[in-house]
Image (spheres, rainbow, N blue to C red):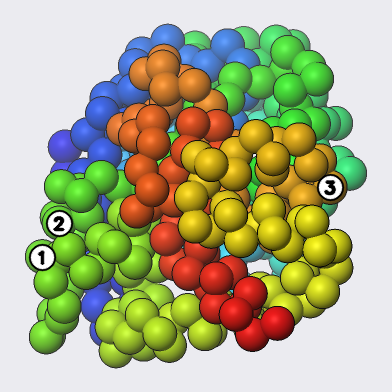
Amino acid sequence: MERILLGFAPGVRVRFADRERGLQRIRGLAEQGTGLPVVIYGPEGCGKTALLRQAASVLREHGYEVLYVNALAETLEAGVVATPGLSKALRELLRSVIGERVSRIAESVSLLVREALRRLEKPRLAVLLDDAFQAIGLSRVEAYVKQLLDLIEHPGPEYDRLVVMVTSSEGRSRLLLARHLWSMSLYLWNMDKRGLGELYEQLPGDKPGLDDVWRVSGGNPRVVRILYTMGWSAERARDWLVEEKSLGLLLRSLGPGELETLRLLVEDPAAAEEEVLGNQGLLEKLIDYNLVMLVPRRREALWLDNVPPSRDKGLGIAGTIAWQTPLHRDAVAAALLSL
């Protein structure tokens, strides 16, 4: 299978690295279709978009017409990709739906899919929606996923196979969808050290050792990109993240007890785990700010690719809670020191 090229930074393109187990799982989905919409959760920047773009290539090899939508993309060219047969069938409808906003494609996907099924004879059809929940808003997530389920269960025109996959970094949507049996959640973690090495070796110029990049990024490709664009300065990346996520504002909203719990979470997630899980207000804020994730059980069936370690103090991972990356933890630690 050909690995696609991806934009990494201005003037730098890299070949899709690692994730062989995840791609094998997607091949399995292609063989039978998805009985439920598949929702893929993972830390911000862990590679969900890259995996979905590579999945489009896998699905095309299995005879699928593919509609890929990155609902948060800034341009139509980056945000909407359709295979030729599907693009031809939907050309007029796509033009009327798109307007000037990529997100309108995600919002109108039910209409588009039903039109594709009407125009194509018993197709294999894949709909890959990247960051759709962020585009439509949390208040609409449940209704949106129910619409995707209805496409699979009550499509109208017949189809051969249908694959529906959605990615999200939005942790609160996971809690909303857990109330229903409308979707199947799979989880993607940051790359392991071997996979990170495959990406690291493709990057040009002088760079720190792989161990140093691993310590800050925890295998998160977006953090690697941030480090690269900031001259590999972990301090600059940390200070940027403090401001980018308005961590000072977050900390000022916490009470003294919550701040102490947060300090313990920075020092040792395993030691703070029970206190954080028992403080619903603090936990929700940390999830809303995309600083931590609730980690599902380490059963391979739940994970699209590699399973994270059960505990790793250096990476900020405990049994059921983890910092999205070590850089996120370092940024909170710096913000706490400035109080």
Depth-wise, is mark 3 or mark 2 nearer the camera? 3
- The residue nearer to you, when weighing 148 against 18, is 18
> Answer yes or no: do the residues labelled 3 and 2 have beta carbons within 8 Å?
no
Q: Residues within 10 Å of mark 2 (few under 14, many from 20)?
A: some
Residue underneath mark 3: 281
Under mark 2, the amino acid is: Gly
- Of 85 and 55, which appears nearest the observer? 55
- Tell me, yes or no, if residue 154 can be seen here: yes
What amino acid type is highlighted by mark number 3? Gly
Could you tell me how far apart the alpha carbons at marks 2 and 1 are, in whole angstroms?
A: 6 Å
Residue 94 - label:
none
Instruction: Give whichever of 140, 42 is nearer the camera.
Output: 42
Q: Looking at the rendering, which quadrant does residue 101 occupy? A: bottom right
Task: Identify the residue position indicated by label 1 in the image.
Answer: 201
Mark 1, other Cα within 10 Å: few <14 / some 14–19 / many ≥20 = few
Q: CA distance from mark 3 to mark 2?
A: 38 Å
Asked which secondary structure carries label 1, the reply is: loop
Q: Indicate the secondary structure of the residue bearing disc 2.
A: helix
> Which mark's residue is nearer the viewer, 1 or 3?
3
Say if mark 2 contacts mark 1, CB within 8 Å. yes
User: In the rendered image, which quarter contains the N terminus?
Assistant: top left
The mark nearer the N terminus, 3 or 2, is 2
Farthest residue toward the right?
A: 139
Residue 210 as seen in the image, left or right of residue 149:
left
| Residue position for label 2 | 197
Residue kind at label 1, given as amino acid type: Glu
Q: Is residue 183 above or below residue 97?
A: above
Q: x, y (%) of residue 158?
A: 62, 11
